[in-house]
Image (cartoon, rainbow, N blue to C red):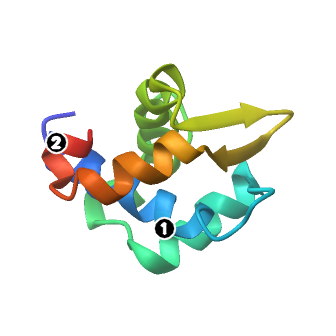
Amino acid sequence: MAQITRRRCGELLRGLFEVLMPLADGLPAARALEALEKVVPPTPYELGAFESGGRRYEKIIRWSTVDCVKAGWLVKSHGRWTITDDGKRAHAELRDPEVFY
């Protein structure tokens, strides 16, 4: 996990918010991850897989979103991810990816 820094997690989350913010109804998680990949492409390390299975890129993002849900910035409901008004404000105010994460 040493190659996944706080800054990188923040970059991924900010990109995810940019993908989801214009969509009032959000997106299914899989589609959000596909869209994010075009905005914030995976690094060579993230293209690899964990020994337990699954590509690192998706798992890193899914783990990173937990704090956003707890903060009330992101809602995950029935497989759909949606940004809240608080999440939009946080995205506007916390420009530094390290602070955002």
Task: For label 1, count other residues whose C-alpha is less than 10 Å away and answer few (under 14), some (14-19) or many (20+).
Answer: some
Task: For label 2, count other residues whose C-alpha is less than 10 Å away and answer few (under 14), some (14-19) or many (20+).
Answer: few
Residue drawn at 44 percent across, 77 percent down: 39
Q: CA distance from mark 1 to mark 2?
A: 16 Å
Q: Position of residue 42 (x, y in %)?
A: 37, 66
Residue assigned mark 2: 99
- Quadrant of the rendered image containing residue 51: top left
Q: Position of residue 68 (x, y in %)?
A: 46, 32
Q: Is residue 76 visible?
A: yes
Residue drawn at 56 percent across, 68 percent down: 19
Looking at the image, which is closer to me, 17 or 38? 17
Left of 37 or right of it: where is 28?
right
Residue 18's tag is 1
Residue 97's tag is none
Picture layout, residue 37 above or below residue 68: below
Looking at numbered disc 2 in the image, what kind of residue is underneath it? Val
Looking at the image, which is closer to me, 22 or 29? 22
Residue drawn at 49 percent across, 58 percent down: 17
- Quadrant of the rendered image containing residue 33: bottom right
Q: Position of residue 98 (x, y in %)?
A: 14, 45
